[in-house]
Image (cartoon, rainbow, N blue to C red):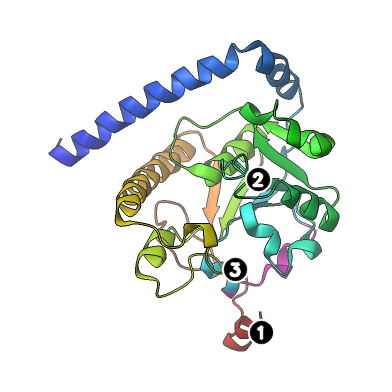
């Protein structure tokens, strides 16, 4: 084992230990125990169904999502800004970023989503379940109560965890280029299909050093996820147009928009 492989292994052990401690605190907290038990008693909803996870990379602008109308879809974060969002009526929308707790992302986004798509289930971390400003939306919220054993996958990891927990037959994902950090650094292109996140503009170099480390961990854990799915016979397919993620089986099942349509969008 070379030096860098050893460093990655060391990080795996440290992060795993920290996450287990955090999980124990949540699992044995009286305020979360009954909620977790309640969520575990829900019958898995994905048996016999496929799910399409729609992430927010710039490549999403090149794909025609209209063919997913009537299918089980899941969006994340600012994904509700996609022009097809209302037509698709997503089954799920995921938020796990603490920007929502800090007020950087308004909680009113949940209301905006439910106005466009009233039957969408909002997936939020179990650890947020006692926060009062989510109470008005409680009937539409599913509290995420199980995570894959990989800790650097962010919102995509929550999507994959839910899809696997709910026993979906086949998991497809798109809009996952894994190149956003590069676009943020060199500012030659947008980091998302809707543009750039204004709250991330003017980052200092010190923050990029942290972000690059996190991105490295992210790619490492995506490789671990691909192996986990292979070993557990979980069908997961990357249908992104391009991108870095060659560790997953790839298919091109979404039509590519021509240049004129992309410009209009």
Residue 78: x, y in percent? Answer: 64, 57
Residue segment shown in magenta: 62-70
Q: Position of residue 225 (x, y in %)?
A: 45, 40
Q: Earlier in the sequence, mark 3 or mark 1?
A: 3
Can residue 2 be spotted in the picture? no
Q: Residue at x 44, y 43 (%)?
A: 226
Quickly name the residue at label 1.
264
Q: CA distance from mark 2 to mark 3?
A: 17 Å
From the viewer's perspective, tell me whether residue 59 is left or right of residue 139: left
Secondary-structure class at tag 3: loop
Which residue is at the front of the view, 254 or 216? 216
- Helix, strand or loop at label 1? It is helix
On screen, residue 71 versus residue 260, left or right, reads right
Q: Which mark is residue 235?
A: none
The residue most toward the left is: 2
Residue that mark 3 sits on: 194
Quarter residue 186 falls in: bottom left
Q: Badge 1, how many Cα within 10 Å: few under 14, some, many 20+?
A: few
Up/down of 175 relative to 3, above or below = below
> Is-magenta flag for residue 48?
no
> Circle 2 sits in a helix, a strand or a loop, which is it?
strand
Q: Position of residue 89 (x, y in %)?
A: 80, 57
Q: Is residue 129 in view?
A: yes
Lower sequence index among marks 2 and 1: 2
The quadrant of the rendering that contains the N terminus is top left
Residue named by callout 2: 94
Q: Nearer the viewer, mark 3 or mark 1?
A: 3
Q: Could you classify mark 2 by the number of other residues whose Cα lies within 10 Å: few (under 14), some (14-19), or many (20 or more)?
A: many
Q: Is residue 63 magenta?
A: yes
Marks 3/1: CA distance? 13 Å
Identify the residue at image location x=72%, y=45%. Answer: 49
The CA span between labels 2 and 1 is 28 Å
């Amino acid at each position: 084992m070379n030096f860098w492989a050893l460093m990655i292994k060391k990080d795996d052990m440290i992060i795993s230990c920290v996450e287990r401690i955090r999980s124990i605190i949540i699992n044995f907290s009286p305020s979360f125990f009954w909620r977790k038990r309640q969520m575990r008693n829900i019958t898995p909803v994905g048996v016999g169904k496929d799910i399409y996870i729609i992430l927010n990379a710039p490549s999403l602008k090149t794909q025609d999502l209209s063919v997913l109308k009537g299918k089980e879809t899941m969006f994340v974060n600012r994904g509700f800004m996609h022009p097809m969002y209302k037509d698709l009526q997503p089954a799920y929308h995921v938020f796990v970023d603490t920007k929502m707790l800090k007020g950087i992302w308004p909680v009113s986004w949940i209301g905006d989503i439910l106005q466009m798509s009233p039957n969408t289930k909002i997936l939020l971390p179990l650890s947020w379940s006692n926060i009062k400003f989510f109470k008005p939306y409680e009937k539409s919220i599913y509290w995420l109560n199980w995570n894959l054993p990989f800790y650097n996958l962010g919102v995509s990891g929550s999507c994959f965890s839910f899809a696997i927990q709910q026993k979906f037959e086949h998991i497809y994902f798109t809009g996952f280029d894994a190149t956003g950090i590069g676009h943020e650094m060199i500012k030659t292109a947008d980091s998302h299909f809707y543009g750039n996140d204004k709250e991330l503009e003017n980052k200092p170099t010190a923050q990029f050093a942290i972000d690059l480390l996190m991105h490295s961990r992210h790619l490492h854990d995506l490789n671990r996820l691909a192996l986990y799915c292979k070993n557990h016979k979980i069908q997961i397919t990357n249908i992104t147009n391009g991108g870095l993620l060659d560790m997953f089986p790839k298919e091109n099942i979404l039509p590519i928009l021509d240049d004129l349509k992309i410009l209009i969008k």
